[in-house]
Amino acid sequence: MKPIFINFTDENGEKTKTFTTCTMKTGIVDNIFDIAERAEKLEKGNVTMSEVRSFNNDLKSLILEVFKYQFSFEELNEQVEQEELMKVFKDICNSIGGGLKKN
């Protein structure tokens, strides 16, 4: 698996920290598929605000798990832009897709 990076920034958008992960255990892949299916539903629209909120919280929990809790939920909330969060999620999905194509 290629390394996946997440960048933390300060209030000015300047990068302050970068965390990396290079492995994912098979158990987490089911969670990734679940979140990816929910993301597709969100992109199609017609969802409630509570569904969006639930998705966002579950996505953050998933990212904590993927990065093996190198940072806290609070740090993620306070130091990672939403755009960065979605980029990292796409990188995670691509790393799984890439692994499937090799087999």
Image: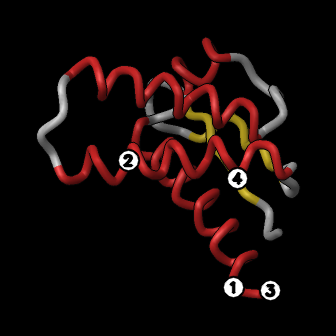
Q: Residues within 10 Å of mark 3 (few under 14, many from 20)?
A: few
Q: CA distance from mark 4 to mark 1?
A: 22 Å
The earlier-in-sequence mark between 3 and 2 is 2
Name the disc covering residue 5, or none. Answer: 4
Q: How many marks?
A: 4
The earlier-in-sequence mark between 4 and 2 is 4
Relative placement, left or right, of 15 versus 72 is: left
Which residue is disc 2 drawn over?
39
| Secondary structure beneath label 3 | loop
* Amino acid of disc 3: Asn
Which residue is disc 3 drawn over?
103
Q: Residues within 10 Å of mark 1 (few under 14, many from 20)?
A: few
Identified at 52% across, 59% down, the residue is 90
Q: Position of residue 44 (x, y in %)?
A: 19, 53
Mark 1–mark 3 CB contact (< 8 Å) = yes
Identified at 60% across, 68% down, the residue is 94
Q: Toward the viewer: 5 or 9?
A: 5
The earlier-in-sequence mark between 4 and 1 is 4
* Amino acid of disc 2: Ala
Mark 4–mark 2 CB contact (< 8 Å) = no
Of circles 4 and 3, the one toward us is 3
* Amino acid of disc 4: Phe
Q: Toward the viewer: 92 or 7?
A: 92
Q: CA distance from mark 1 to mark 3?
A: 6 Å
* Amino acid of disc 1: Lys
Q: CA distance from mark 2 to mark 1?
A: 22 Å
